[in-house]
Amino acid sequence: MDFSLLTEALASKSYQNIADICDNLLLQAAAEGVAYEDDWPYSIHLLAHIYVDDINSARFLWKSIPSAIKESQPEVVAVWKIGQKLWVRDYGGVHEAFRGFDWSQEVQCLVAAFSELYTKRMFHLLLSAYSTISIQDTALFLGMSEDDAANYVLQQGWVVDPASRMLTVKKQTIVTEQKLDATKLQRLTEYVFHLEH
């Protein structure tokens, strides 16, 4: 099998494209009748679906992986553990799953990138869901120590109350630009003129 597209995507850190590349290569191998099971990069394929937040596809891929592969490749099982934690929304468990395995070189970069992306997703979740939250809960969601989590959110403008160990969330202001062109202004003028006369 020719994994050059996959290798290029990994080298260029185009992680958002890897799931589609793997899916297409898998379909191509199946159409050509090529035996691919032993050489297939299941860890990367599973993690790529998880990276693009496609847990359902990751689940179906997991179910299609032969039992012999699951037993002989512990890294595939470790990647699926991340998927399981995401499926049950065990936010702290996802970070534990990242740190709970000694990843191979080719998977390590993808795991690190997803870990960073996941931390950002969790931060935005906290940002939209809470007005105040404890430092302990923030650390759990972000997968950091309490000190690191407090420093991380303080850099984002949140406020800490040292007595209660609570954080006050600073909502990000959303700036929307209204594009006002001459035709819109002309229509508004005509409408107001019509109402007045």
Image (tube, rainbow, N blue to C red):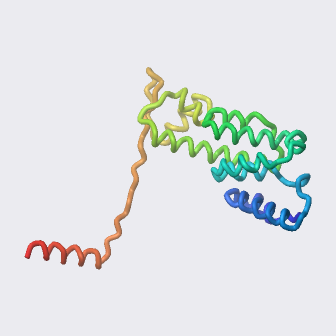
User: Residue sitting at 71 percent across and 49 percent down?
Assistant: 58
Q: Quadrant of residue 8?
A: bottom right
User: Residue sitting at 66 percent across and 47 percent down?
Assistant: 55
| Image quadrant in which the N terminus is located | bottom right
Q: Can residue 17 be seen in this snapshot?
A: yes
Image spot of residue 35 (x, y percent): 91, 59
Image spot of residue 151 (x, y percent): 54, 35
Q: Quadrant of residue 186?
A: bottom left
Q: Quadrant of residue 97?
A: top right
Q: Is residue 48 left or right of residue 72?
A: left
Residue in the foreground of this view, choosing between 53 and 164: 53
User: Residue sitting at 47 percent across and 41 percent down?
Assistant: 127
Residue in the foreground of this view, choosing between 60 and 130: 60
Image spot of residue 17 (x, y percent): 69, 61
User: Residue sitting at 46 percent across and 24 percent down?
Assistant: 162
Number of numbered markers: 0
Q: Is residue 111 left or right of residue 65?
A: left
Image spot of residue 62 (x, y percent): 77, 46
Q: Is residue 137 left or right of residue 112?
A: left
| Image quadrant in which the C terminus is located | bottom left
Residue in the foreground of this view, choosing between 93 and 66: 66
Q: Is residue 115 left or right of residue 107?
A: left
